Image: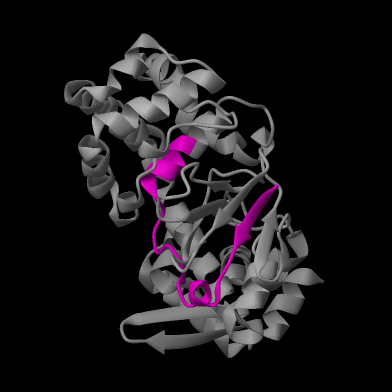
Amino acid sequence: MLRIHFTPEDFARIRVVTNPDPFWEIVCSLHRLQTSQGRWAYADWFRGAWGPVSATPLGRAVRRLLVPLVPRAAYFPDFLTPYEAMAGMKAGAAAILDTPASRIDHELRLLDGVSGTTAWARGLVAHERRRELLGLLCAYHEAVIAPYQDHMAAGIAGERAVRGRQALDSGVHGLLAALTTTARWRPPVLELDYVVDRDLRLDGRGLCLVPSYFCWRTPIALAEDSLPPVLVYPLHDTRRPEPDCPSDASLCALLGRTRAAALQALALGATTSELARRLGVSPATAAHHTGVLRDAGLITTRRSLNTVLHTLTPVGAALLRR
């Protein structure tokens, strides 16, 4: 079990990332390659993204070099998921390159004690080997993560909308209590099912919540308590939806295939551009569908500066639950 201890100052410093963290998605996707658990939820990713790559030189390098570095175990090195990566791939890569050799050596020794290390991994204390690592990570991300970028971004936008509504409706306590299906909020401690038994004391530093497309069921925290606290947890909808229509034929018959898919996609909230990416249509077409759904009383639209956020009304939510 993971027990996260909050102080009053921490409640004011809870935030949710605005975009997918590229290095956490890399690590979590590598974990997906090492187990059959949850494979049904990522079946299209295995076929459409990883499948064509698996037999290539890149795929072989991933299995030989990257998988041993991030085993699906009680520990993998923290330096592979730098806090700076929340600002994007470039910032994260720079942080990995700038990590002190002494820290990398320490973390690799910890890894060696848990699952063993390769000679290639032990060479990461050198800058040139880290450049080689970053080249491989970037190539892997471009080949198998980037094709899902729009979907992941839309999912995180929806997640932020849900968490925002929870905070407004029931405060931070309600947000933490509903964070994951394994969360148990016993103020001031958040308990989560975890791979090891540990306590994480925030001590006024706050907590950055990182919803992840490739994280499956069990949340992840950095192993080193002195690093900025983050909690990586699964997006609620880990299965990539079909782009054209939900499975409910009666809803399709009532609203039309694309409009029914739009209503489902808005269950977590989305902007017009995010909805367009989810449906594979132009923003103008997405705006037309949201206009029809809004006129029917199924969604509501709020504008904040240059952003328009669409969410379900109680009637729209009831229609999906029927």
* Above or below for 247 versus 115: below
The residue lying toward the viewer, choosing from 40 and 272, is: 40
The chosen color scheme is: one colour
Residue 68 drawn at (x, y percent): 47, 19
Instruction: Residue at the far top: name it.
Output: 119
Please give the name of the residue rendered at 24% of the width and 35% of the height, measured from the top-left corner. 100
Quarter of the figure with residue 172: bottom right
Quarter of the figure with residue 297: bottom right
* Above or below for 220 versus 191: above
Residue 240 visible from this viewpoint: yes
* Above or below for 285 versus 76: below
Residue 295 drawn at (x, y percent): 57, 89
Quarter of the figure with residue 114: top right
Residue 132 lies left or right of residue 57; in this view the side is left
The residue lying toward the viewer, choosing from 158 and 310, is: 158
Instruction: Residue at the far right: name it.
Output: 322
Residue 269 visible from this viewpoint: no
Residue 187 drawn at (x, y percent): 69, 71
Q: Quadrant of the C terminus?
A: bottom right
Provide the residue span drawn in magenta: 1-27
Please give the name of the residue rendered at 55% of the width and 58% of the height, measured from the top-left corner. 201
* Above or below for 201 versus 142: below
Please give the name of the residue rendered at 73% of the width and 57% of the height, measured from the top-left corner. 181
